[in-house]
Amino acid sequence: MHTQTLAPHESMELHEALNFKTLCLAKSKLMQGIVFDQELKNLMQKDVVQSIQAIADLQAIYARAPFQAPLLQNRPTPILN
């Protein structure tokens, strides 16, 4: 059976959407610490929960991308000087 894969441009657009949603999640999570209004804090928490679900959904679709980054067996030595 042939499994459907994404076209390269679809994979890149999905990658951009995943990055954007991840940044939105981080911002909402960080801003909760400096918000004092409970109603706004609850709204931001709802956004965090929905963002986590959206990221999981996007990652499931991203698994169908026609390419994957190779996993390095040995990590490069960091330059310290």
Image: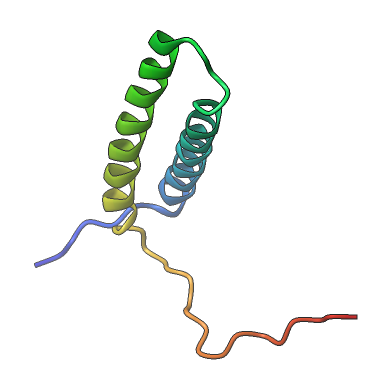
| Res 3 → quadrant | bottom left
Q: Is residue 6 above or below residue 33?
A: below
Residue 52 spot, x, y in % from top left: 33, 39
Viewer-nearest residue: 24 or 34: 34
Q: Is residue 81 left or right of residue 51?
A: right
Q: Quadrant of the C terminus?
A: bottom right
Residue 5 spot, x, y in % from top left: 28, 57
The colour scheme used to paint the residues is: rainbow
Residue 33 spot, x, y in % from top left: 53, 28
Residue 69 spot, x, y in % from top left: 48, 70
Please give the name of the residue rendered at 44% of the width and 54% of the height, measured from the top-left corner: 8
Q: Residue furthest bottom?
A: 74
| Res 47 → quadrant | top left
Viewer-nearest residue: 26 or 31: 31
Q: Residue furthest left?
A: 1
Please give the name of the residue rendered at 42% of the width and 68% of the height, measured from the top-left corner: 68
Q: Is residue 60 left or right of residue 3?
A: right
Please give the name of the residue rendered at 48% of the width and 33% of the height, measured from the top-left corner: 29
Viewer-nearest residue: 11 or 24: 24
Count of marks, rendered view:
0
Q: Is residue 43 above or below residue 54?
A: above
Q: Is residue 44 left or right of residue 49?
A: right
Q: Residue furthest right?
A: 81
Q: Quadrant of the N terminus?
A: bottom left
Q: Is residue 49 above or below residue 78?
A: above
Please give the name of the residue rendered at 37% of the width and 25% of the height, measured from the top-left corner: 45
